[in-house]
């Protein structure tokens, strides 16, 4: 069945042309995703320096990351509920302000315990970001734009993560000192600067965004019709019973557990791997760590775009979501093997870049499924998926550090290959056509 797709008017009359407010909304959402990953990637890249300066062991650093990831996982559902209950405008403003404050506080950490406490509160704030942002797009994106929208937002997050090593290298090499408050230089200045950036974004979001196109003064009728106008923000209670009883949710969540474990191996530990195994200095680490993350950015864009292209061409939602994602997981599993076995950092980074590109190919598709099946409750649906997924991310922190300390760095990456195969098998069971009905 061909999807119902609205087309843009072709009249030369400016009044009949749709405005493009939805594109600005998407751009603001992309910026939020970039900030989330910049804030968390600072710690990933600066770990060798922070460990040395604060005297933190590799295993203890794993527990610090576990604390962040566990808090992030457990507050996904409350965060998604906030977005569905109070609207993305207010909810996202609150959570971004919260985590930005704790990003800045990280600059003041003085030992392992203080770093752990700050990271837990940071995780509580960031937990709401992706579910609420998914809810924010549910009223602004057409069905045939959802894969690309989710792909481009996640591409923004990966681009932010990719740029962070380069930015942090600049802070580390040139240094920055603010007198009068606390000596801030290197990684500390980066945490402070990104905290301020998040606060500025919060102000811009609250001033510009509205929960539906109908509430936005700059949206004309043509754009409302194009999106699917005439709808108001739902005030119905979140149908938790229907969500938890929906068979697809738990298969989707298990798949995302596998994905998120792998994602966090790359994002949290790849710079440490390069430093420990290939002895890449902090000055050169930025470029080497940048390559897989930038490849992941391209994978986000390509996977989401291709999924929507297949949907427009065939009208088959499951073909466009399921099989496109499975291809990405299989390629990622295969490319990881030569990456692990390579003896030079250049060859290893090349294959890891392919593996991460293919892994990220799947993420826009994964986040399009909650939009497909969740509708007005996409925030809560995606929160369940992301909560279970980030339990995988939390577990990865302790699994990676303990296995790397005991058996070397090859084992954690072999685990990612196996989990890609499991995720591909789980995607066979995901049916994006089965929608969740309100109670």
Image: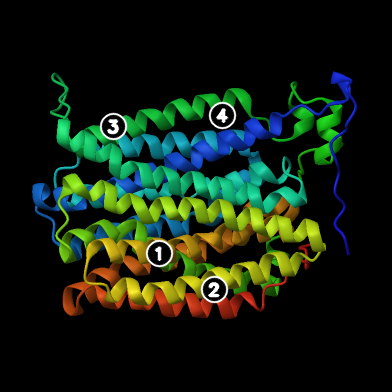
Residue 406 in the image: state x and y as whole percent. 17, 78
Query: Nearer the N terminus, badge 1 or badge 2?
Result: 2
Q: Is residue 27 above or below residue 151?
A: above
Circle 2 Cα neighbour tier, 10 Å, few/some/many (<14 / 14–19 / ≥20): many
Residue to which mark 4 is pinned: 205
Q: Separation of disc 1 and disc 3 at Cα? A: 25 Å
Judge from the rendering whether residue 438 lies leftward or rightward of residue 285; answer left or right.
right
Instruction: Calculate the distance from the C-alpha at mark 1 to the C-alpha at mark 4.
Output: 28 Å
Image disc number at residue 326: none
Q: Which quadrant is home to the N terminus? A: bottom right
| Residue 216 visible in image | yes
Secondary structure of the residue carrying tag 3 is helix
- Mark earlier in primary sequence (2, 4): 4
The residue pinned by badge 1 equals 393
For the residue pair 147 and 347, the one nearer the viewer reads as 347
The residue indicated by pointer 2 is 254
Query: Badge 1: few (under 14), some or many (20 or more) residues near its Cα, within 10 Å?
Result: many
Q: How far apart are marks 1 and 2 (CA)?
A: 12 Å
Secondary structure under badge 1? helix
Reply above or below: 355 against 87: below
Numbered tag placed on residue 192 in the rendering: 3
Q: Is mark 4 on a helix, strand or loop?
A: helix
Mark 3 and mark 2 in contact? Answer it, CB < 8 Å: no
**Is disc 1 in contact with disc 3, using a CB cutoff of under 8 Å?**
no
Are the two marked residues, 1 and 4, in contact with CB atoms closer than 8 angstroms? no
* 417 in relation to 53, above or below: below
Question: Label 3: few (<14), some or many (≥20) within 10 Å?
Answer: many
Residue name at image x 65 percent, y 53 percent: 305
The secondary element bearing badge 2 is classed as: helix
């Amino acid at each position: 069945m061909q999807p119902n797709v609205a087309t843009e008017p072709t009249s030369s009359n400016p009044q009949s042309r749709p405005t493009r407010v939805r594109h600005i909304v998407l751009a603001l959402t992309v910026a939020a995703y970039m900030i989330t990953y910049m804030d968390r990637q600072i710690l990933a890249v600066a770990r060798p320096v922070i460990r040395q300066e604060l005297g933190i062991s590799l295993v203890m650093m794993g527990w610090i990351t576990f604390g962040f990831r566990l808090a992030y996982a457990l507050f996904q559902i409350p965060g998604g509920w906030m977005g569905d209950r109070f609207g993305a405008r207010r909810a996202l403003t609150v959570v971004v302000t919260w985590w930005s404050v704790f990003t800045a506080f990280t600059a003041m950490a003085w030992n392992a315990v203080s770093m752990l406490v700050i990271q837990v509160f940071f995780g509580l704030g960031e937990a709401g970001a992706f579910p609420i942002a998914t809810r924010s797009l549910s009223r602004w994106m057409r069905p045939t734009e959802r894969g690309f929208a989710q792909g481009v937002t996640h591409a923004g997050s990966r681009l932010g993560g990719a740029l962070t090593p380069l930015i942090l290298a600049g802070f580390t090499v040139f240094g920055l000192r603010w007198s009068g408050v606390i000596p801030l230089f290197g990684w500390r200045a980066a945490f402070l600067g990104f905290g301020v950036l998040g606060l500025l974004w919060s102000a811009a979001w609250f001033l510009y965004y509205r929960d539906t196109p109908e509430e936005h003064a700059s949206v004309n009728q043509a754009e409302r019709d194009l999106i699917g106008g005439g709808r108001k923000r739902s005030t119905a209670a979140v149908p938790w019973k229907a969500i938890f009883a929906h068979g697809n949710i738990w298969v989707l969540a298990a798949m995302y557990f596998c994905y998120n474990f792998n994602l966090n191996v790359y994002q949290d530990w790849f710079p440490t791997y390069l430093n420990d195994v290939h002895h890449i200095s902090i000055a050169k680490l930025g470029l080497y760590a940048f390559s897989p993350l930038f490849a992941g950015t391209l994978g986000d864009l390509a996977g989401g775009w291709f999924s929507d292209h297949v949907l427009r061409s065939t009208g088959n939602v499951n073909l466009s979501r399921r099989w496109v994602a499975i291809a990405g997981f299989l390629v990622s599993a295969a490319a990881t093997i030569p990456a692990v076995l390579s003896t030079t950092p250049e060859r290893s980074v090349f294959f890891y870049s392919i593996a991460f590109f293919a892994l990220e190919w799947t993420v826009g598709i994964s986040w399009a499924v909650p939009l497909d099946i969740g509708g007005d409750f996409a925030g809560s649906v995606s929160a369940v998926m992301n909560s279970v997924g980030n339990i995988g991310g939390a577990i990865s922190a302790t699994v990676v550090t303990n296995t790397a300390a005991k058996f070397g760095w090859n084992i954690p990456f072999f685990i990612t290959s196996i989990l890609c195969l499991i995720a591909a098998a789980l995607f066979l069971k995901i049916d994006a056509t089965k929608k969740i009905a309100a109670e």
